[in-house]
Amino acid sequence: MDGPDEIIHQPIRLRVMAALTALDPGEDGLDFTRLKALTGATDGNLGAHLDHLSRAGYVEVTKAFVARRPRTTVKASPQGRAAFARHVAFLKAIIAGM
């Protein structure tokens, strides 16, 4: 049995990946404010975790201005979706007692 994905295993990153992979791959992703509310993280903490996930290739972060206000949108990459699926399979195997 493979082990946990050490990048995703951290609680905030696990919440981020769960929220992002729950979306249809064709959707635009979630904005930073929504992810912050879903994870309970602070701005700086969430930013650091998103940077970690981005460097691993698990998420795509897009920064834009909407009505002269900055907007950061985050989307799970295909690699991130596959990694999350493997991590969930690992957790299910533990639950099943394998």
Image (cartoon, grey):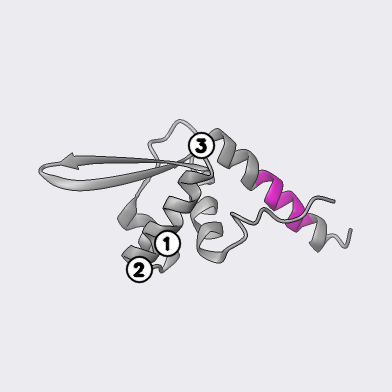
Question: In the displayed image of the protein, which residue is found farthest to the front?
Answer: 55
User: Residue type at mark 3?
Assistant: Ser
* Image location of residue 58, percent across then percent down: 53, 43
Question: In the displayed image of the protein, which residue is found farthest to the left?
Answer: 68
First in sequence, mark 3 or 2: give its number. 2
First in sequence, mark 1 or 3: give its number. 1
Q: Determine if the magenta segment contains residue 86.
A: yes
* Image location of residue 78, percent across then percent down: 56, 34
- Along the line of sight, the residue nearer the viewer: 28 or 59: 59
Left or right: 25 in relation to 31:
right
* Image location of residue 16, percent across then percent down: 49, 55
Quadrant in which the C terminus is drawn = bottom right
Q: Determine if the magenta segment contains residue 31.
A: no
Mark 1 vs mark 3, CA separation in Å = 19 Å
SS at badge 3: loop
- Which residue is located at x 35 percent, y 68 percent? 42
Label 1 Cα crowd, 10 Å radius (few <14 / some 14-19 / many 20+):
few
Mark 3 vs mark 2, CA separation in Å = 23 Å
User: Residue type at mark 2?
Assistant: Thr
Q: Circle 1 is placed at which residue position? A: 38
Label 2 Cα crowd, 10 Å radius (few <14 / some 14-19 / many 20+):
few
Residue 43 sits above or below residue 20 on the image: below
User: Residue type at mark 1?
Assistant: Leu
Q: Circle 2 is placed at which residue position? A: 42
Residue 35 sits above or below residue 54 on the image: below
Label 3 Cα crowd, 10 Å radius (few <14 / some 14-19 / many 20+):
some
Left or right: 52 in relation to 34:
right
Q: Circle 3 is placed at which residue position? A: 77
- Which residue is located at x 59 percent, y 55 percent? 8
- Which residue is located at x 24 percent, y 46 percent? 71
The residue range painted magenta reads 85-92
* Image location of residue 47, percent across then percent down: 37, 57
